[in-house]
Structure formats: structure tokens, C-alpha cells
Amino acid sequence: MTGQPSGRGHDADAIDQLLATVARNSARLDALESQVTDGQEQIAELQAQGLVSTRHAEQLRHALCTSRRIGAAVGIVMARTNVTEEVAFDALAQASMRGNCKLRDLAEYIVETGSTEVLHVP
């Protein structure tokens, strides 16, 4: 006997919860990716019609990519800390203000490193 109650144990349950969170976040990222693709197509169409300048189109493309990275960072925070999307975003926003850095830069750091140590997640 290992001293654990019969069943799979705490670690297996935690892994199942983490996998479920990753699956939910993956679906959210897929939806965001689709929105970014749609947005890029709409920008190209507006630009082709002469309704958007090249400079404005580039700004819009940059904003789309930035929102994607922020969404990915939110997903990472959710998966690592087991919090809701709202709590994860709030933690990013608070860390951005505390560190006096842009949210997009903080999101980029989290996506690149996977580290959430700079956050104070409740």
C-alpha cells in the first residue's frame, strides 16, 4: 500500500485538469487565429479598394498580431495558474502597470519564455 486512497490520485486529477484547460485554450487560440486571418483579409480588401492607406493597413495588421500574442499569453496564464480568462487578463494588465511596460511587450515575454513569475495571480 502506498498510503494513497484507491483511484488515480491527486497528480492524475491535476494532469487531467491541466489537459482540459489546454484544450479549452487551444480552441480559443484557434478561434482567435481565424479572426486574425479574417481581419487580415478585410484589411487587404479595404486597401485594394483604396479605403485604407498602406500605413494604416500596417497599423491594423500590427494590432491584429498584438492581440493574438496577448490572447496567447492569457491562455498560458490560465493554464499555468488555473484561473479564468478574466483573472488572467487582469493579472497581465496589473503587471504591465506595475512594471511600467506595454501589455503587448509583457505578453510577448510570457509567450516566448512561458514564465508567469512576473504576475501576481490570486
Image: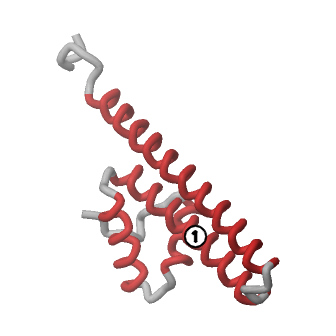
- Mark 1 burial class by Cα count in 10 Å: few <14, some 14-19, many 20+: some
**What is the x, y in percent for residue 15?**
38, 34
Out of 24 and 3, give the one closest to the viewer: 24
Quadrant of the rendered image containing residue 97? bottom left
Out of 9 and 61, give the one closest to the viewer: 61
Out of 57 and 115, give the one closest to the viewer: 57
Disc tally is: 1
Check the image and report above or below for 32 versus 94: above
- Furthest toward the front, the residue is 49
Give the residue drawn at x 30%, y 64%. Answer: 87
**What is the x, y in percent for residue 4?**
20, 20
Name the amino acid, label 1: Glu
Check the image and report above or below for 102 versus 70: below
Give the residue drawn at x 51%, y 74%. Answer: 106
Please state, as top left, top right, bottom left or bottom right, where the C terminus lies in the image: bottom left
**What is the x, y in percent for residue 109?**
56, 69
66 displayed left or right of 61: left
Q: Residue under circle 1? A: 108
Give the residue drawn at x 38%, y 55%. Answer: 78
